[in-house]
Image (cartoon, grey):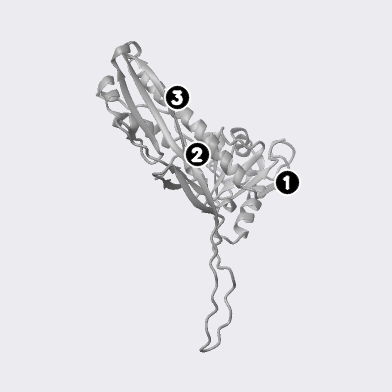
Amino acid sequence: MAITYPPAAPSVSGDQLTISTFLKSPTLVARRLRTLAEQRFIADVLLSARLTTDSGAVLYETGESIYSDRAPESVAAGAEYPITTVGTGTPQLAKTEKWGQDSLITDESISRQSMDPVNRALTKQVNQLVKTIDSIALSAIASAVTQSTGASAVWDTGTPTILRDVLKAKAAIRALNEGFEPDVLVVDDLTWAIIASDPAIAGLRAREDKSNPVYSGDFLNVGGLTVLPTPNLGMSKTALIVDTKQLGGMADEKLGGPGYVSAGGVGVEAKTIRDDENDQWRVRARRVTVPIVLEPKAAYKITGVLS
């Protein structure tokens, strides 16, 4: 499943259904939450493996080598082949956590503001879920990934060599010869602005290109890496290079329960509850998940990128 990041601005298409009918249908609410969540979770982009559990715990192995434990040997005619062991990774155990919240939408607010309070409630719930879970996932990645190198010079002053720093870190991952192929560069928003406006990189871009950040405000690629800005990076003055296909995954637990509907591949579940005693709706969004880093060597930090 493709997940777009950075997100597009949230929008709502016209719907002939009444607001009450919409809120009575958890499936429609779940679809709306899925549309918002798929555009926002960077955790699911970096940890792309889709893992599930029914028990609340996940047993996995990290750092498994792609090689056998000994080199092949020359085998004489009629001789026996040497036997080698095949090592496994380090076993780890992770426990899922349930994250969620409710929003109350009164009949008065719907009557006076139409669909707006519903949209705002759903958008804010998803934003808060993303902020929390992305921060947890990025913190897990930061703790697991120990490979790093310092920037040759800070990127925001003087004469930085941003492209060289990025390509050197990318080369360091590939030089491990473990089959990793970095495809993403993750930075905070300020660092993204510095990279996009760097005159040395700008001078290397194709001329008369309307995708240039001068025109588009977007900066999608440097050194073969898709640049993803996030306010939830949590690693001060650090850029992160990742092989998103091998770094790990998000292990989701679908608790189910009466009235809950899955919001798709991002693991969010939705539920709407009518509170007739207080003339209001209760809208709930939750995600039961834990980030899993399977291959710490599939990522590399560049430290000291800002002064």
Q: Position of residue 285 (x, y in %)?
A: 39, 29
Quick check: can you spot residue 125?
Answer: yes
User: Crowding near pointer 2: few (<14 within 10 Å), some, many (20+)?
Assistant: many
Q: For this rendering, which residue is in front, 298 or 72?
A: 72
Q: Earlier in the sequence, mark 1 or mark 3?
A: 3
Kind of residue at disc 3: Lys
Q: Is residue 164 left or right of residue 249?
A: right
User: Crowding near pointer 1: few (<14 within 10 Å), some, many (20+)?
Assistant: some
Is 200 rendered above or below residue 104?
A: below
User: Crowding near pointer 3: few (<14 within 10 Å), some, many (20+)?
Assistant: few
Q: Position of residue 217 (x, y in %)?
A: 53, 34
| CA–CA distance in space, label 2 to label 3 | 17 Å
Q: Is residue 141 left or right of residue 284?
A: right
Q: Earlier in the sequence, mark 2 or mark 1?
A: 2
Query: Which mark is on residue 42?
Result: 2
Look at the image and tell me in which quarter the N terminus lies. top left
Kind of residue at disc 1: Ser
Residue to which mark 1 is pinned: 152
What residue sits 32% from the left and 25% below the top?
272
Q: Earlier in the sequence, mark 2 or mark 3?
A: 2
Q: Is residue 96 left or right of residue 63?
A: left
Residue to which mark 3 is pinned: 124
